[in-house]
Amino acid sequence: MARIKITDLPKDQRISRKEMKEITGGYYPQGGRWSFLKNPWVLGAIVATAIAVPLAIDDSDDGS
């Protein structure tokens, strides 16, 4: 994908706040109940929890 520089745009071009957030990777909570799962921070927290919880509850004192 080609990059667009600011100098490549016409001087009278106007971009809405929503379009700018979409371009820069901003999070827009639109699209339903579970759309927050698209947020990379939420996904990272879920993965970290899925790894940490089994390690924390593992009983290493069972003699094996």
Image (spheres, rainbow, N blue to C red):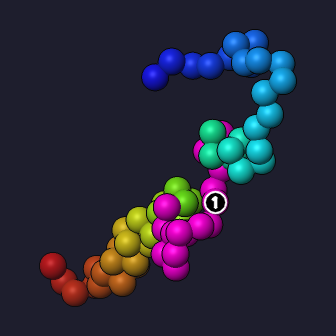
Q: Is residue 50 magenta?
A: no
Classed neighbour count for the residue bearing mark 1: other residues with Cα under 10 Å, few (<14), some (14–19), many (≥20): few
Q: How many marks?
A: 1
Indicate whether 39 appears above or below 56: above
Indicate whether 57 appears above or below 23: below
Q: Which residues are magenta?
A: 24-38
Q: Nearer the viewer, residue 32 or 60?
A: 32
Q: Residue at x 65, y 50 (%)?
A: 26
Q: Is residue 40 visible?
A: yes
Indicate whether 22 appears above or below 15: below
Q: Residue at x 64, y 60 (%)?
A: 28
Q: Residue at x 78, y 27 (%)?
A: 13
Residue type pointed to by label 1: Tyr
Q: Is residue 45 visible?
A: no
Q: Residue at x 57, y 19 (%)?
A: 3
Q: Which residue is mark 1?
A: 28
